[in-house]
Amino acid sequence: MQSGTCVIKNARIVLPESLISHGFLDISKGRIVRISEGDFSSTGSELVFDARGGTLSPGFIDLHVHGGNGGTFTSIDPAEHALAREFHLKHGTTSMFASTHTTEFSSLLAILKSLSASSRSDKNGSKVLGIHTEGPFISEHKPGAHVVAQLKAAELSSIDEVISAADNFISMVTVAPEIPGGLELIKYLTQKDIISSIGHTNATYAQALAGIQAGARSTTHLFNAMSPLSHRDPGAVGAVLDNEAIYAEVILDGIHIDEAIFRIALKCKGVDRINLITDATSLAGFPDGEYRVLSDRAVSKIGGKIVVAGTNTLAGSALDMNMVYKNAAKFAQLSQPELSKISSLNAAKIAGRESDIGSIEIGKLADLVLLDTESDVCATMIEGEWKYVNSAWKEALSR
């Protein structure tokens, strides 16, 4: 199917505020044109797919993902970028911000040039909405797995080099607001309609609040690599939990944060301000072992945990968005519309793309994921075309 025009029948359909238990979607030229309850009556001319009672949910949107299946976005090799996008497509991600991490600055500029070009030209795998640079404008006191010697001051000339290297494809930058020039950088990015995300920060409550007031709209993995919440020193975590103007990004693997912390964050922020992400590295989908995936250090993958070898320092995750979605359902009592908000719609709002993606509504792009009764991904659709179908569903969805 190349036209992006079809009907999907016999589906449970997740809407922004409700659930259709049995209905169908009519898709024309890649966009949703009709949503209806009940059986579909065919005229015989339509291309019709049978969802067989599966659940149609908005395609997952991951605004913080570094790689997967051996491919990393912090590489100049377009083949690695493609590996990562294709891996995450199979797990339901329809759109993403391809994320880089701190490296030697001249190398980062070369990576951004290559990543921007491959993201725009190669349409296989998940769609790339833009690039997220996690570092180098972060705190030496909360570097996580980033190399302190490679961090940079928040100079506007440096961010201009970053934006230019990526040919204006930068959509998000992680910034520690308390570093010299941090607030000015957030204001500058805001003027350029680039999202500032507060992260890898040792900010006080007041400094983090100043970052939010300067225009920061998101948080890079809330709780991880940032000044913690204390009853006399609320820190960056307290500022984010206390402020409705900023979204809280969380890594939901039960490792980066405890499941109880997720529930507490939900109570503070609500389902309209939580954004689930993977922070996946190239080791997502790989077996346990020690790997030389960083230029200067090895990392170890043990179960679902990835650390800098020989330390307890977390170095990203081994997640995909399907795992994150299922963990959210397991850790908290959430309805499917609520799950779709924190895995799709809120990310679309952060990215400023909610008019096109993030929910199943008439007029929006048909970016969908089909889930079975166990919430596993059966198929992924982008703009009305099945881009991935697992083996058990090929007969039903390959007409």
Image (cartoon, rainbow, N blue to C red):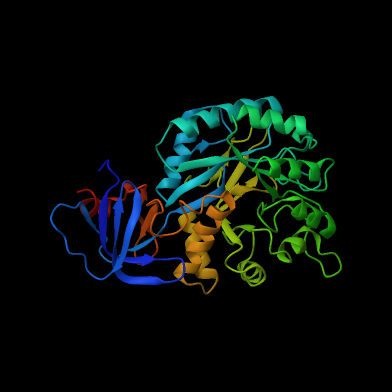
Residue 155, given in percent of the width and then of the height, sits at 79, 34
Q: Is residue 181 visible?
A: yes
* Camera-side residue of 61 and 290: 61
Q: Residue at x 47, y 72 (%)?
A: 335
Residue 109, given in percent of the width and then of the height, sits at 65, 27
Q: Residue at x 33, y 48 (%)?
A: 384
Residue furthest right in the image: 232
Residue 247, given in percent of the width and then of the height, sits at 64, 58
Give above or below for 311 relative to 248.
above
Q: Is residue 282 visible?
A: no
Q: Quadrant of residue 296?
A: top right
Residue 129 left/right relative to 241: left
Q: Residue at x 59, y 36 (%)?
A: 293
* Camera-side residue of 212 and 140: 212
Residue 29 left/right relative to 243: left
Residue 180, given in percent of the width and then of the height, sits at 85, 41
Give above or below for 175 relative to 54.
above
Query: How many callouts does the rendering have?
Result: 0
Residue furthest left in the image: 44
Considering the image in quadrants, where does the N terminus appear? top left
